Image (tube, helix red, strand yellow):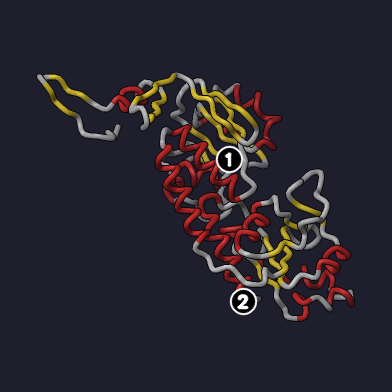
Amino acid sequence: MALDAAPVIQNGRTFVPLRLLSEAFGKWVSWNQGSRTAAISSTLTLKTSTGSFTLKAKPKRIVTLSSADTEMIYALGGAVVGRPTALGAVNPPAAASAVEVGSTHGILFEKLASVKPDLVIASPALKSQQATIEKLGAQVLFNSQNTFEDIKASVRLYGKLLGKESKAEEITAGMDRSVGSLKKPASKPKTLIVYGAPGSFVVALPTSYPGSFLELAGGENVASKFPKMDTMPQYAELSMERIVASNPELILLITHGDAAEVKAGFKKQFEGNAAWKSLPAVKNDRFEVLPQDLFAANPGIRAPKAIETINNLLLQVD
């Protein structure tokens, strides 16, 4: 194990950091700078997006089921033995050697069992699988992030889990600096964000990660008052009438498919509508397909880059 500080020899005795020995025995160590005292605990209670969660032992074999969680764990200096199945490049590359065990949409239980996890970090959407996962001897931490603030909260959560609170604060402060340094458009261009593919488009609300990013980038989400879907409360159904009434100046598309094909399919879906043709975004051909690697799934700690991408597009409209 790497030491936080070098050993010291005094009077024939070797002293090593308390954290090293404590963590070697599966304990958590927290440091209070004010009183200059250390606290050692055998369990750890965390506040997740779904409520309170108590770890019974410090995890050594972690599995993540979302790419955002995987990147956060590695950014904090941790590692995973199982990760979500990748559709493209694995981020970070160091996680490529971990076993692919499924995703937030479904778990490959044979693969999951093969890595012998002691902690699985999963989306609340997988709560119905909790008992099956626990039969493998693992605890399940349910957590999700839908906004920029949620993402930072998750970084702090995993920082506490790994005993890397200082590193978590360093990462979140850097994220805030990156977003705070962006030049915002003067006019807050009216923007619509559409997610999906022809025939299955939905609209991103401010409570979704793309919607959250749009507001931080300096745009106005024209769908802010669209009624949310029951099955996907961060999104709204695509409605021609609502879109025309909201009069967007810019339309941003997010897709897992071919960008050019999806863009053409979206435009074709409404091209016969006269009111549609009168929209500023349509008249000025302001349709942009956002990069898949930053938007097709929650980008986690790469959120500032995603926000900057939208910001650059808004400045072209302003």
- Residue under numbered circle 1: 65
- The residue furthest bottom is 284
Q: Residue shown at 71%/30% (left/top)?
A: 128
Give residue 46's position: percent from left, percent from top. Answer: 54, 29
- Label ID, residue 316: 2
CA neighbours of label 1 inside 10 A, class few (<14), some (14 to 19), many (20+): many
Give residue 147's position: percent from left, percent from top. Answer: 63, 49
Q: Do the residues bearing badges 1 and 2 touch, measured as CB atoms within 8 Å?
A: no
Name which of mark 1 and mark 2 comes first in the sequence: 1
Vertical comparison of 106 with 87: above or below: above
Quadrant housing the N terminus: top left
- The residue furthest left is 11
Q: Which amino acid does label 2 sit on?
A: Gln
Q: Residue shown at 44%/34% (left/top)?
A: 162
Vertical comparison of 288 with 211: above or below: below
Q: Nearer the viewer, residue 191 or 79?
A: 191
Q: Is residue 148 visible?
A: yes
Real-space Cα distance between discs 1 and 2? 37 Å
Q: Can residue 262 be seen in this view?
A: no
- Label ID, residue 273: none
Q: What element carries label 1?
A: loop
Q: Nearer the viewer, residue 42 or 98?
A: 42
